[in-house]
Image (cartoon, grey):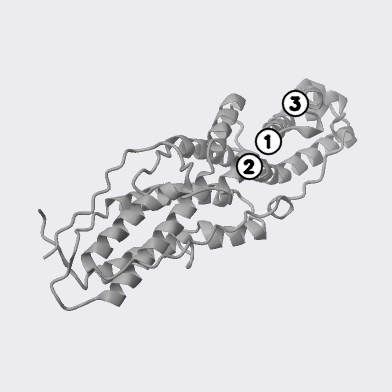
């Protein structure tokens, strides 16, 4: 009776694979174990498909009407520090402001308009200017969720996470994703508290968290790792199903810990990414909804996550046709 052990013992790396072949190495080792056990030729492998393209800019963003400066030119609003805010924004940011800074500006503007409206200032305004202030506050309140959405989905730091020009990760050397999770949690906090007068945003922290997301295309890496794992498990299952024999052939014991680790890391990350989409109090653009359903969802059928889970179960059934080799 043949005896094999499948040992995944390579060192942990905190970076993505510079060489895409690195992600194949653990699967090649596992396939070689199965090939040696059955002694019936090589496993036929197929390349996994790439992930779908992230929706184009015009398909993932909302059109937001620009507020005319004349609407903000109400003399009494100087007491609310609104005109100075607008002037500072025009001087410092201009019309090429990064989406994140535009988000901070619009949220601060909404806060000051709201505080102004609930102060004594409106009582000193003419009926016309009071109505202008009321209309402006209503407009900015309506627009803020769309501004928040655009700020995230127009930022390179966020969209680059879905880059197709990426590689799968090594299943036996999954990186820590805690820094990226913290970054996403801060984005979620900003969305959740966008209408809070008490919660104070932090420009430096926002930029730091966005820079953390910029460091690697983690969403794409996670999806491609799931797809590679599913494909290699399917390849191995097909091999076992086609070579099952009622003899004493045994298989090396299967250490599934790395599969469980991938499930855990991918679930946590995809849950966080879906949370950014779902937390917004507005319906996402149709293109984003379609992408989410096809690639990011943990529940929708035929997503990388669901295919991976199905591949694990299918491979367990394929292996169950054989006994496990005795340990050395």
Disc number placed over residue 186 in the picture, else none? none
Identify the element where label 3 is drawn. loop
> In the figure, is residue 41 to the left or right of 105?
left
**In x, y percent, where is residue 201?**
59, 29
Picture residue at 48% right of the left edge, 61% below the top: 48
Disc number placed over residue 103 in the picture, else none? 1
- Residue 96 showing in the rendered view: yes
Q: Are marks 1 and 2 in contact (CB under 8 Å)?
A: yes
Identify the element where label 1 is drawn. helix
Q: Residues within 10 Å of mark 1 (few under 14, many from 20)?
A: many
Asked whether 22 or 202 is in front, the reply is 22
**In x, y percent, where is residue 53?**
62, 56
Picture residue at 27% right of the left edge, 66% below the top: 316
Q: Which residue is mark 2?
A: 152
Q: How many marks?
A: 3
> In the figure, is residue 324 to the left or right of 107?
left
């Amino acid at each position: 009776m043949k005896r094999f052990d499948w040992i995944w013992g390579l060192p942990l790396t905190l970076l993505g694979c510079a060489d895409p072949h690195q992600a194949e190495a653990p699967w090649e080792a596992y396939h070689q174990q199965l090939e040696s056990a059955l002694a019936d030729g090589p496993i036929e492998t197929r390349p996994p498909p790439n992930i779908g393209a992230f929706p184009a800019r015009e398909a993932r963003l909302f059109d937001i009407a620009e507020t005319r400066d004349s609407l903000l030119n109400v003399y009494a609003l100087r007491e609310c520090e609104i005109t100075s805010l607008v002037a500072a924004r025009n001087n410092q940011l201009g019309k090429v402001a990064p989406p994140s800074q535009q988000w901070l500006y619009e949220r601060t503007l909404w806060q000051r308009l709201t505080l102004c409206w609930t102060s004594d200032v409106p009582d000193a305004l003419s009926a016309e200017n009071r109505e202008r202030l009321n209309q402006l506050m209503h407009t900015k309140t309506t627009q803020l969720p769309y501004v928040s959405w655009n700020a995230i989905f127009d930022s390179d730091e966020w969209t680059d996470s879905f880059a197709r020009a990426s590689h799968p990760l090594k299943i036996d050397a999954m990186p820590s994703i805690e820094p990226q999770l913290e970054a996403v949690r801060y984005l979620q906090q900003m969305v959740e508290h966008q209408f809070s007068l008490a919660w104070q945003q932090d420009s430096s922290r926002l930029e730091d968290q966005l820079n953390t997301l910029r460091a690697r295309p983690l969403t794409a890496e996670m999806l491609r790792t799931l797809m590679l794992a599913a494909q290699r498990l399917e390849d191995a299952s097909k091999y076992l199903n086609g070579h099952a024999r009622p003899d004493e052939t045994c298989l090396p014991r299967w250490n599934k810990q790395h599969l469980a680790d991938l499930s855990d890391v991918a679930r946590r990350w995809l849950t966080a990414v879906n949370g950014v989409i779902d937390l917004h109090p507005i319906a996402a653009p149709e293109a984003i909804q379609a992408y989410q359903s096809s690639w990011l969802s943990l529940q929708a059928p035929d997503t990388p996550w669901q295919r991976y889970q199905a591949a694990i179960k299918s491979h367990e059934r394929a292996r169950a046709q054989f006994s496990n080799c005795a340990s050395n």
